[in-house]
Amino acid sequence: MTDRTTSDLPIVVTTVAELRARVAAARAAGKRIGLVPTMGALHEGHLSLARAANTECDFTIVTIFVNPTQFGPGEDFNRYPRVLVHDLQLLSSVGVDLVFAPEQQEMYPAGSTTFVEVAGLTAQWEGAVRPQHFRGVTTIVAKLFNAAAADVAYFGQKDYQQVTVIRRMVADLNMPIEIRVCPIVRDADGLALSSRNAYLSDDERRRALVLSRSLHLANKLVEQGETDTAKIVAAMRACVESEPGVVIDYVAVVDGDTLEPVESLRDKSSLHHAVAIVAARVGTTRLIDNVILE
Ligand code: AMP
């Protein structure tokens, strides 16, 4: 690990060519390169990834790019918060080595027609509600992996399906990069941090707590010995539905690798791999959360 200055704003580069040149220099100096892809509007969740990268690597790159291809028609691409200067201030407190913040035409020049698509894992859950979403995610992440040539990339468990899909892509395409998953960072009251929480009114934010409450309930039922996932899912649903103005997209208990629904937690291996996942709309804001059942 190298010493990083934790007061100046980080160096920002906006072109793939300059990113490559700086990474090549770091690599020539024998540094291990860590990559943290984000869409900006940074919060403690993102910063926890940058800190993990700083701890395990010698050169940390945070990317900030609101990726148009992962938003569907009618989604929040246009209103997604873009606060680069504030993001850089937050990152200066962590002390990263480089921020890559390209414009849209740098990542998708006119004439781009190539996409990376993972089949199977993307069919359900987020993929069912947001049909083009994962194709956009895997395409931009593959492009960032190619551009940054990092040794390790850091993702949050918050987007459980996303990181499962990215692991699949990395394995299927023999990408020479390690994937690390960091725990979900929550506010003190349990709400998982998300850039989209900025859309919530005070009242909606209070209602949104029902998502983490439902996951807490799932874990409590498992602790009490419940192994029937239909009962766990029914209890989670009832919990979320008890909050007016919160509309469920899905609630499920799934296998942590295949993302297929798990029927019973009776045998130890299924419990070991089970994840409770929830997605719901609170007003016009769509939120997701999950917990690994233990
Ligand atoms: P985003 O900017 O929403 O694309 O997220 C960038 C990365 O930060 C993804 O790997 C997310 O899973 C991760 N992330 C988002 N929210 C959290 C959180 N509350 N805790 C940990 N990681 C998070």
Image (cartoon, helix red, strand yellow):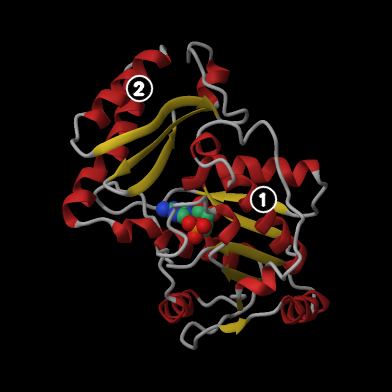
Q: Nearer the viewer, residue 237 or 103?
A: 103
Q: Is residue 233 left or right of residue 242?
A: right
Single out the residue that lies furthest toward the bottom: 8
Which is nearer the N-term, disc 1 or disc 2? 1
* Amino acid residing under circle 2: Glu
Asked whether residue 226 is in view, the answer is: no
Asked whether residue 159 is in view, the answer is: yes
Q: Is residue 205 left or right of residue 78?
A: left
Up-down relation of residue 1 to residue 173 (above or below): below
Q: Nearer the viewer, mark 1 or mark 2?
A: 1
What residue did someone put label 1 on? 138
The label on residue 20 is: none
Question: Pointer 2: residues within 10 angstroms few (<14), some, or many (20+)?
Answer: few
Look at the image and tell me in which quarter the N terminus lies. Answer: bottom right
What residue did someone put label 2 on? 223
Pinpoint residue 48: horizontal percent, then vertical percent: 47, 61
Question: Pointer 1: residues within 10 angstroms few (<14), some, or many (20+)?
Answer: many
Quarter holding residue 110? bottom right
Pinpoint residue 151: horizontal percent, then vertical percent: 74, 61
